[in-house]
Image (cartoon, grey):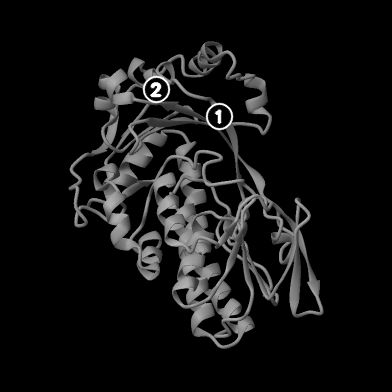
Amino acid sequence: MNNLSHRIAIIGAGLGGLTLAKILQNAGYTPVIYEGEASRHVRPQGGTLDLETHTGQRALKIAGLLDLFYEVCRFEGQSSKTVDKNGKIYHEDRDVLPTAEGGSRPEVDRTELRNLLLDSLQSDTILWGHTCTGAVPIDNTKYELHFENGHTDVVDLIIAADGAFSRIRPLVSDEKAKYSGISMVELNITNAEELFPELVAYNGPGTVYALSDYKTIIAQMNGDGRIRIYLGFKAEANFLETLELSNNEPEIAKQTLLNLYSDWSDELKQYIICANEEITPRRIYMLPVAHKWENKKGVTLIGDAAHLMSPFAGAGANLAMLDGAELALSIINTDNQETAIREYEKKMFDYAAKASKETKENMDLFFSEDAAAKLGALMNSFKE
């Protein structure tokens, strides 16, 4: 598809779409990214993530951004500890060197990584405030995109990077994101080191996994000095509504959450007691493991639009960036658009199915009997 005049539209300015756009621009293409949010500053981008050598880091290397990533990532953030509700330790690893040789999964705050990618693009790449509502084919060669603000655009290729509830996915697949059976509540402890030094010392520079009774407390130290906490529950889809959590009454909301962890250790309960920012409930959705579709001219999917999965293997962002890189390389190195998309999809279906299967198995482990012991054994096996 070495026709640089072809108009390529990327729907969504997440990590996958930005990686794709950067690599295409490096090769002389001029893709446009349509993003529904008004600016990069509209909302927090979430917590910290670890970038795998062969997925996220590989994508950044192809994009020419790996050295910049090493300037902002935290190798010490790979440290972790696995405990049960009583605080019994099943795995602990704090011996991570703060160098590129220290491990294969350095941590980076999502906002930091997204800003790195955003700042690398040409200034006119992204059209903010354009929420895509769908697309219709034109003469079997192009698509007309429609947006909430009334804007339309005709393009040769649509790449859906618009997440779990993609408006473009229905063009190629009838599958919809479904509730996974897991609900989570996100808490944050800002300025943690100054306000709660004992909790920071307990947590360490990485992640604590506390698992028992089909519940979790997962706490991550972030680069901005906050501890971000994810309370997880194996529950019915209406579970979060029954909690009636309100940010207008945070102490009542925290007490409601503490009641759910009444027999957990005092150290672990501190993650709830010390929370000092908004309380954010969310259901976890997923697409079927090994989701795939028949190749269709002029449109394809990357990231969560293609293979939405739960966060229990840390694969989502890594795969989205790898998707962007693999698709960009296929477009750049293939003369025919249909062949380029088909080759990308074939490769992506294979590695995404493996990651999706592993993620589903991890999710089931996290919310199983004796989960801490099982996760500890798994983590320890990686060191052998």
Query: Residue pushed farthest bottom?
Result: 335
Left or right for 22, reference 164: left
Q: Is label 2 in a helix, a strand or a loop?
A: helix
The correct choice, above or below, for 349 with respect to 213 in the image is below
Q: Position of residue 302 (x, y in %)?
A: 57, 63
Q: Which residue is mark 2?
A: 271
Closer to us: 363 or 66: 66
- Amino acid type, callout 1: Thr
Query: Residue pushed farthest front?
Result: 123
Q: CA distance from mark 2 to mark 1?
A: 15 Å
Residue positioned 38% across, 63% down in the render: 60
The correct choice, above or below, for 118 with respect to 156 in the image is above
Residue 293 badge: none
Left or right for 379, reference 341: left
Q: If the image is split into quadrants, where does the N terminus sit?
A: bottom right
Residue positioned 26% across, 21% down in the render: 197
Q: Which residue is mark 1?
A: 280
Q: How many marks?
A: 2
Foreground mark, 2 or 1, reads 1
Q: Is label 1 in a helix, a strand or a loop?
A: strand
